[in-house]
Image (tube, grey):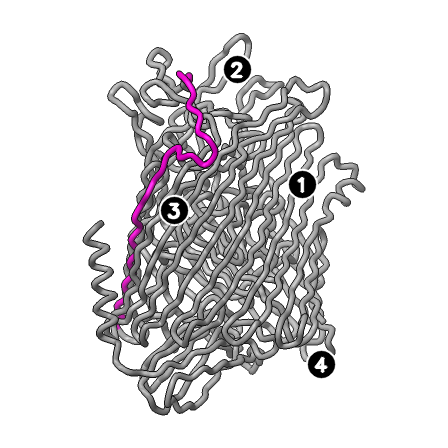
Amino acid sequence: MRYQIIYILLLITVSFGAYSQQKVTLSGTVTMKTNTETVIGASIFIPEAKVSAITNSYGFYSVTLPKGEYTIVISCIGFENIEEHITLTGNTKKNFSMLEKSRTLDEVVIKYNSPATNIRNPEMSVNKLSIATIKKMPAVMGEVDVLKAILQLPGVSTSQEGATGFNVRGGSVDGNLILLDEAVVYNTSHLFGFFSVFNADVIKDLKLYKGGIPANFGGRTSSVLDIYQKEGNNQEYHVTGGIGAISSRLLAEGPIAKGKSSFVVAGRTSYAQLFMKLADNPNSVSFYDLNAKLNYNINDNNRIFLSGYFGKDKMDFSNFFSNTYGNSFFNLRWNHIFSEKLFSNASIIYSKYDYGLKIKYVGIDWVSDIRNYNLKYNFNHRVSDKLVLNYGLNSIYYQFNPGTIKPMDEKSPINADQLEKKYAWENALYISAEQKLTDKISMNYGLRYSNFLRLGEQNVNNYANNQAVVFNPTLQIYEEGTPTGVTYYGKNKKITGFGNLEPRLAVSYSINDDQSIKASYNRMSQYIHLISNTASVSPLDIWAPSDQYLKPEILDQVALGYFRNFSNGKYSLETEAFYKKIKNKADYIDGAELIAQKAIEQVLLNGEGRAYGLEVMLKKNTGKLTGWLSYTLSRAEQRTPGRNAEEPGINNGEWYRANYDKTHNFSLTAAYQRTKKWSFGGIFTYQTGKAATFPIGKYQYQGITIGNYGVRNANSLPAYHHLDLSATYTPKPDSKKRWKGEWVFSIYNVYNRGNAASIMFEQNRETGLSEAKRISIFGIIPGVTYNFKF
């Protein structure tokens, strides 16, 4: 590891010397012409010098050139190209405004900027989807959904219908770092995953990193989903909304001080519960969310933002159980331009996720939550036209409430209790460099150092031989250990700590202008964990920090890919093979109880995980018919061997399929612009059934039939597949009036496939025979929504 650090520092030092010759810098901000929203990921290209740059997450760019005359070409998907001649005699600041491209139909094709694969950029294992692309996909119940779009990408899947979250390259749900305006979102789902928490009307840009993750991201071992909200139109007021069958939404934006500051506010709510009551259905499900953002341009070099999100889900299932959960955050950001070459962003963030569960037949009312206070300070430094540095720091303070327990009423046998709260502090320093070594070779390399401290105030259990889980050799099972004592740690006193170096490296070799080979390696550390048992009455969401028993996960991932554009970018092909290995993968002992568990370490063991596979994505980027085909062949496994020769471990210490393992994952996504008035979309998805454990026999005990289960996850649920279709009708596409509307007609699961969320094994009361029943959540669901803006 020491030699890796020295190597990186030497590369940076050599680069400084090589490119320190006298040059001038052109810098500025790229915005949308209609509303001055910053444009993320716009390409600035200077043909004469063969120099290029990409606008950062705040629309800022910088290029360094010798003095002279140049042609500046600016392009971005969904916008008209800008081409301008400029003479550089000294450092120059120049802002550009891009006009959204109106797609014009001719007899054959729709012409717009092609989202072709970036051949020369070392960035790999990354998918970027524009909101324009997402809005052309079939919308379930007329609701455009960011996460539904992500699930159509290679390497991304969901464990089952009705499940929350998503899995990337065989990783767990908690391995995804999900950021909305840089704030952590802990749960991405509304209504059992039917909707996501991301309102597409207010989303400006999103990027999914599956590998080759830059050094400024950390704290997770699976992926990073980086999403930014719109900033609001600072020129004029606009309202956008939609009225659907079970939910509606509304967005308002406009200037606070014209040309200087703006706001955007968006809200959604569901009303499915009203229809349930009219139908005398005792169950109730509902959600709401609110997005808000303010921004103010202090001057050309300083800008501040204040953004927030508030969302809540409520579900009540008759006399069985009720469930509530929700996210909220605030983020205050400051953008500052130090010079033509140095840009900075500082953020102060508060995030919270709370989860409540009432089990009525038990009489328990249980609430848990996680809160964090986050400080980020990042610098983007363009040293030269061939070297860009990114460096900064990140500090997060966590508060974990594993459970506040109350009786539901006076008849409940439950006693009020408060499980001990936990505290932690995570810090990181990082530096990365993007460097063009030759015309054919580009690199992105960096190093991140992360540090995690478990802090008091807390009583910590002590165990014999430091083992919170013990093995019973007579019964051949693992059992909860009995504490031998307790050690008290005062407020902010260190309980335990971890530190890890996380190197990152990505290399691109351009065969020619249309072909390249890329490779990447990254190490990631994850210090907080989602303790969840999906076999319980309601899937639990308890977040826990690493400690002396629950070790931090350490990921090593390598990937190799081949990328190609065909027919001037009309088609593109992306193929990647990956292998990842995780140390300290948490695993549950058989029969683990999680509700009101005071000592979570007593039901967990540390094992290891691995995943490997091949991803293929073929895209058609232009024409009336656009879309992509993605396929993933992969395996995700984990293993928890015994701690000594006498212990068998979980599943006899052998590798077994992870809960979210999907061998085959195929998706076909298409959008067809028939006329200006009519457009159509379709998605077909096929996935191998998720891993499951079925009984291999049964026995009688005191008159009760009990299933005898085999090795863990040796079976599979039936294959998961469905077809979704949508049609969008715009009555007056060429209308010059401010009011514009469209109708969206959709059918989810066209052929009414009963995809299995689980298989229930029970005894038939009439025949006495054992039988398996498929439990399905969704069948065919038609929908219609009216969208409008003015």
Choose mark 2 or mark 1, whichever is in front: 1
The residue range painted magenta reads 482-511
Amino acid type of the residue that numbered disc 1 sits on in the rendered structure: Lys
Numbered disc in front, either 4 or 3: 3
Residue 443 picture location, percent across and down: 28, 65
Report the amino acid beneath label 4.
Lys
> Pointer 4 and pointer 3: residues touching (CB < 8 Å)?
no
Q: CA distance from mark 4 to mark 1?
A: 42 Å
**What label sits on residue 314 in the rendered view?**
1
Q: How many marks?
A: 4
SS class, disc 1: strand
Residue 736 got which mark? 4
Side (left or right) of 83 relative to 787: left
Q: Amino acid at mark 2?
A: Thr
Quadrant in the picture for residue 476: top left
Residue 764 drawn at (x, y percent): 59, 21
Give left or right: position of 49 versus 346.
left
* Residue 252 quadrant: bottom right
Label 3 sits on residue: 221
